[in-house]
C-alpha cells in the first residue's frame, strides 16, 4: 500500500487505535522510502575514479603531473620521429634524383625543372618528411589521453587559471588542440558559448606551437641547446627545452588574455560546469588508426596544398635577377637591419615572411637563402646543418630568438582565413595578426639587448 493510501485510510477511520496503527505503518513506510532514496553503493569504478581524481585534480600534484605528461608526449614525439623523418627524406631524395634523370632525358628546360622539382617537389616533400612522423606519433598519443578521460581533468585544473585572467576554462581544450593545428583549434572554439571568451580563445590560440612549428623548434633545440649531449640524454634535454618553450607560450596566453579582458574584451568570466567522465580503457588500435588516418592525413594535406605554391614562389624570387642580385636578396638586405635588432638576420626575417602560407617551409627557405642555390636545399645531416648556421654567424642567442619568434609570431595563412570565417570581422582578424607579431618582435628585442648589454654572447 502506498503512503497516500495509508494516509487517506487513517483519516477515514474513527477508531483511534486503528488510526494509530495505520499512522505507525505510514511512518515506517516513509522511513523505509527515505532510506532507499538516500543510500547507495559505490561501484568499483566510482571508487577508482575518485582515487585517481584526488591525484590528477589535486592542487598539489595536478600541475606537476600535467607538465610530466606533456614532457612524455613530446619526448616520444621527438625521439620517435627522428629515424622515420630521415628515412622519408632519403626516399624523397632518391625519387628526386630519378625525376631529374627523366627531365634530362626529355631535354626539359632548366626553368621547368627548377619550378617543378627544385621548387614544388622539394618544398612539398620537405613538409611531408618533417611533419608526417611527428603527427603519426603525437596525434594517436594525444587521442589516447583523451579517450582515457584525462583531458577533462586538464580542463578542470586549468579552469581556475583561465578564470583569473578573465577567460573560460574550455579554452584549455582548444589550446590543447592547437598543438596539432592552430587552424583547427580556431574552429574548435565553438564549444565556448560566451562570444567574449570565445574571442579571447581565438586571439591567443596562436601562442601554442602547432605541428608546423615543431620541426623548427626541435631542430634548433637539438643543435644549439642540447649540443653538448648525445643519445637519449640529448633527446631528454631537447624535450626539456621544448617543454620550457611551450610553458612560456602558455604564460604569454594568460598574460594577453588578462590584458584583453581588462581592455578590448571586458567582461565577467562565465561559470564552467564540467562533468568529469569516468576513466576508461581506450581502444588503442581503433584510436591509433583513426588519429593517424584522419587527423594526420587532413593536416598534412592542408600543409601540402599551402606549401606547394609557396615553394614555387620562393624559387621564382631566388632566380629572377635585377642586375646581379636576385629579388630574394634585395628583400634580405632590406630586412637585415630589423633582423639584427632582434638577434636574427635578414634571411630569417625573409624566411618567416615567405613562410606565411605554412610554417613548415620556414627552415628550408632559410637554408635556400644561406646557400644561395636558388632552390629549396636538402642537407645530408644535422652536423652539416649546424655548420651552415655557424658560418652565417649563429650563436645560441640566434637559435633562442628564432625559436621564440617561431613560437610567438603571426598565425599561418590558413589560420588567419579560419579566424576571418569564424569572426566575420576584418578588425579581429587583423588584431589576431598584429598582437602576436608585436609580441614576437618585442621579446627577442629585449632579450637581445639585455644579452649584449651584459656581454653574454
Image (cartoon, rainbow, N blue to C red):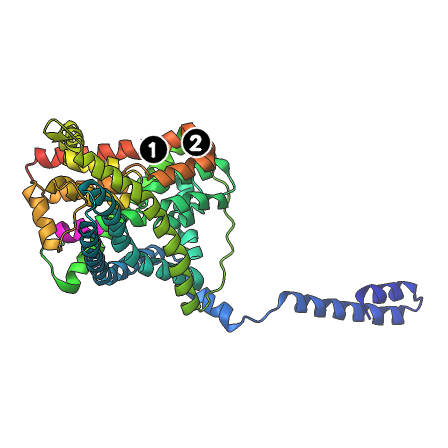
Residue at the image position 44 percent from the left and 69 percent from the top: 281
Q: Which of 31 and 136 is in front in this view?
A: 136
Task: Tell me which segment is drawn in magenta.
Answer: 217-225
Q: Which of marks 2 and 1 is nearer the N terminus?
A: 2
Left or right relative to 188: residue 348: left
Q: Does the magenta stretch include residue 253?
A: no
Is the magenta region chiefly helix, strand or loop? helix
Residue 72, given in percent of the width and then of the height, sits at 28, 61
Kindly give the residue lying farthest to the right in the view shown.
Answer: 14
Instruction: Choose between 290 and 440: the one closer to the eye.
Output: 290
Tell me the quarter of the picture where residue 307 sits.
top left
Residue 307 to residue 65: above or below: above
Give me the residue at 46% from left, 36% from top: 421
Looking at the rendered image, the quarter that the C terminus falls into is: top left
User: Residue at point 44% right, 67% down?
Assistant: 286
Which label sits on residue 415? none
Let me know if residue 273 appears in the view.
yes
Task: Provide residue 27's location: percent of width, then percent of height.
Answer: 76, 67
Residue 149 visible to an observer of this rendering: no
Q: Determine crowd level at label 1: few under 14, some 14-19, many 20+ residues with C-alpha closer than 10 A.
A: many
Q: What residue sits right under mark 2 in the picture?
A: 265
**What residue is disc 1 on?**
433
* Left or right of residue 115, residue 346 in this image: left
Number of residue marks: 2
Determine whether the residue tagged by mark 2 lies in a helix, strand or loop: loop
Q: In which quarter of the image is the N terminus?
A: bottom right
Amino acid at each position: 500500500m502506498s503512503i497516500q493510501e495509508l494516509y487517506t485510510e487513517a483519516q477515514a477511520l474513527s477508531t483511534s487505535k486503528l488510526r494509530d496503527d495505520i499512522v505507525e505503518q505510514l511512518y515506517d513506510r516513509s522511513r523505509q522510502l527515505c532510506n532507499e532514496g538516500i543510500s547507495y553503493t559505490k561501484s568499483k569504478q566510482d571508487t577508482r575514479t575518485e582515487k585517481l581524481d584526488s591525484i590528477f585534480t589535486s592542487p598539489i600534484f595536478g600541475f606537476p603531473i600535467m607538465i610530466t605528461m606533456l614532457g612524455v608526449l613530446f619526448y616520444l614525439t621527438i625521439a620517435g620521429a627522428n629515424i622515420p623523418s630521415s628515412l622519408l627524406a632519403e626516399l624523397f631524395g632518391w625519387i628526386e634524383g630519378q625525376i631529374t634523370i627523366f627531365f634530362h632525358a626529355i631535354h626539359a628546360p632548366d626553368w621547368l625543372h627548377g619550378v617543378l622539382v627544385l621548387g614544388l617537389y622539394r618544398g612539398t616533400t620537405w613538409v611531408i618528411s618533417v611533419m608526417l612522423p611527428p603527427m603519426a606519433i603525437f596525434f594517436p598519443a594525444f587521442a589516447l589521453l583523451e579517450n582515457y578521460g584525462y583531458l577533462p581533468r586538464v580542463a578542470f585544473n586549468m579552469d581556475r587559471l583561465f578564470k583569473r585572467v578573465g577567460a573560460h576554462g574550455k579554452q584549455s581544450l582548444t589550446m590543447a588542440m592547437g598543438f596539432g593545428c592552430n587552424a583547427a583549434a580556431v574552429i574548435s572554439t565553438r564549444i565556448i558559448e560566451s562570444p567574449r571568451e570565445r574571442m579571447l580563445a581565438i586571439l591567443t590560440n596562436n601562442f601554442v606551437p602547432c605541428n608546423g612549428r615543431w620541426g623548427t623548434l626541435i631542430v634548433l633545440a637539438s643543435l644549439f641547446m642540447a649540443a653538448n649531449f648525445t643519445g637519449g640524454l640529448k633527446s631528454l634535454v631537447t624535450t626539456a627545452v621544448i617543454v620550457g618553450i611551450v610553458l612560456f607560450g602558455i604564460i604569454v596566453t594568460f598574460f594577453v588574455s588578462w590584458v584583453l579582458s581588462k581592455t578590448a574584451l571586458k567582461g565577467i568570466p562565465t561559470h564552467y560546469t564540467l562533468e568529469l567522465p569516468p576513466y576508461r580503457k581506450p581502444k588503442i588500435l581503433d584510436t591509433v588508426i583513426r588519429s593517424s588516418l584522419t587527423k594526420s592525413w587532413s593536416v598534412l594535406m592542408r600543409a601540402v596544398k599551402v606549401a606547394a605554391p609557396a615553394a614555387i614562389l620562393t624559387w621564382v624570387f631566388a632566380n629572377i635577377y635585377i642586375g646581379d642580385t636576385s629579388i630574394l636578396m634585395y628583400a634580405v638586405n632590406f630586412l637585415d637591419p630589423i633582423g639584427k635588432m632582434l638577434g636574427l638576420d635578414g634571411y630569417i626575417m625573409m624566411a618567416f615572411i615567405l613562410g606565411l602560407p605554412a610554417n613548415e617551409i620556414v627552415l628550408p627557405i632559410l637554408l635556400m637563402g644561406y646557400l644561395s642555390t636558388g632552390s629549396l636545399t636538402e642537407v645530408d645531416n644535422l652536423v652539416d646543418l649546424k655548420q651552415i648556421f655557424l658560418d652565417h654567424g649563429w650563436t645560441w642567442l640566434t637559435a633562442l630568438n628564432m625559436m621564440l619568434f617561431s613560437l610567438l609570431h603571426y598565425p599561418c595563412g590558413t589560420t588567419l582565413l579560419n579566424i576571418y570565417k569564424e569572426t566575420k570581422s576584418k578588425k579581429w582578424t587583423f588584431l589576431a595578426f598584429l598582437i602576436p607579431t608585436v609580441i614576437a618582435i618585442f621579446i627577442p628585442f629585449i632579450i637581445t639587448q639585455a644579452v649584449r648589454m651584459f656581454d653574454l654572447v
